[in-house]
Image (cartoon, helix red, strand yellow):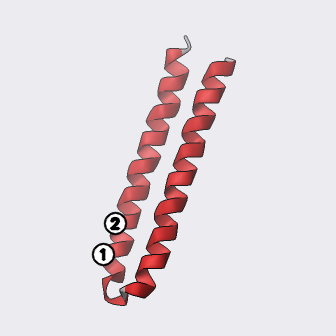
Amino acid sequence: MTGLAAIGAGLAALAAGLGIGLVGSNAVQGIPRQPEATNEIRGAMILAAALIEGAAIIGMILSFLMNK
């Protein structure tokens, strides 16, 4: 793995971690404000986390492929 590929993969992982952390944090803050919407908030949180994780995986793959 070259240096640029490692930096690209690291940035993708870092951004995904921050994004999922923000999504989880906001969901945890939103559930006490509207307890009746707990299931909707949880579903939206899981969907957003999956999309963020997918984007991170694509970013990592592209960083490896672009350095060949």
Does residue 42 sit above or below 49 in this rendering?
A: below
Say what amino acid the circle numbered 2 marks.
Answer: Ala
Q: Based on the displayed image, in which of its 4 quarters is residue 7 positioned?
A: top right
Q: Which residue is mark 2?
A: 44
Element assignment for label 1: helix
Element assignment for label 2: helix
**Is any part of residue 40 visible from this angle?**
yes
Q: Position of residue 62 (x, y in %)?
A: 47, 25
Q: Nearer the viewer, residue 61 or 23?
A: 23
Q: Position of residue 13 (x, y in %)?
A: 58, 42
Say what amino acid the circle numbered 1 marks.
Answer: Glu
Q: Which residue is mark 1?
A: 40
Does residue 26 sit above or below 11 in this rendering?
A: below
* Residue at 31% across, 89% down: 36
At label 2, counting other C-alpha atoms closer than 10 Å, the crowd grade (few under 14, some 14-19, many 20 or more) is some
Q: Position of residue 21 (x, y in %)?
A: 54, 60
Disc marking residue 16: none
Q: CA distance from mark 1 to mark 2?
A: 6 Å
